[in-house]
Image (cartoon, grey):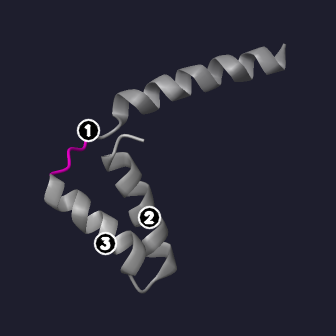
């Protein structure tokens, strides 16, 4: 019974997250800059985050 409640709460939580998500739009220039920074930035954590945003910009 507890597992079913967790699934229900998870589904509700996911719906709430989707409602509150920020809608982002990217110009081709920004996408090009993200592509460059995800490879060439000096800090590995920034490269990782740039990779995430870059993939989001490509709708992957």
Sequence-first disc among 2 and 1: 1
Identify residue for label 3: 36
Q: With respect to residue 2, does 29 lie above or below? A: below
Q: With respect to residue 43, does 45 lie above or below? A: above
In whole angstroms, how far apart are the C-alphas of marks 2 and 3?
A: 13 Å
Q: Secondary structure at mark 1?
A: loop
Q: Secondary structure at mark 3?
A: helix
Q: Residue at x 41, y 74 (%)?
A: 39
Count of all numbered marks drawn on residues in the image? 3
Of circles 2 and 3, the one toward us is 3
Sequence-first disc among 3 and 1: 1
Residue 42 image position (x, y, % from top left) = 42, 86
Identify residue for label 1: 23
In whole angstroms, how far apart are the C-alphas of marks 2 and 1?
A: 18 Å
Q: With respect to residue 55, does 30 lie above or below? A: below
Does the magenta portion include 22?
Answer: no
Q: Secondary structure at mark 2?
A: helix
Residue 59 image position (x, y, % from top left) = 36, 40
Indicate left or right for 8 with 34 as reference: right
Does the magenta portion include 24?
Answer: yes
Neighbour tally class for label 2: few under 14, some 14-19, many 20 plus, Cα within 10 Å: some
Identify residue for label 2: 49
């Amino acid at each position: 019974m507890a597992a079913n409640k967790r699934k229900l709460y998870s589904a509700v939580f996911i719906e709430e997250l989707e409602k509150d998500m920020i809608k982002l739009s990217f110009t081709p220039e920004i996408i090009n800059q993200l592509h460059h920074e995800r490879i060439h930035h000096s800090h590995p954590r920034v490269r990782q985050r740039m990779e995430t945003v870059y993939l989001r910009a490509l709708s992957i």
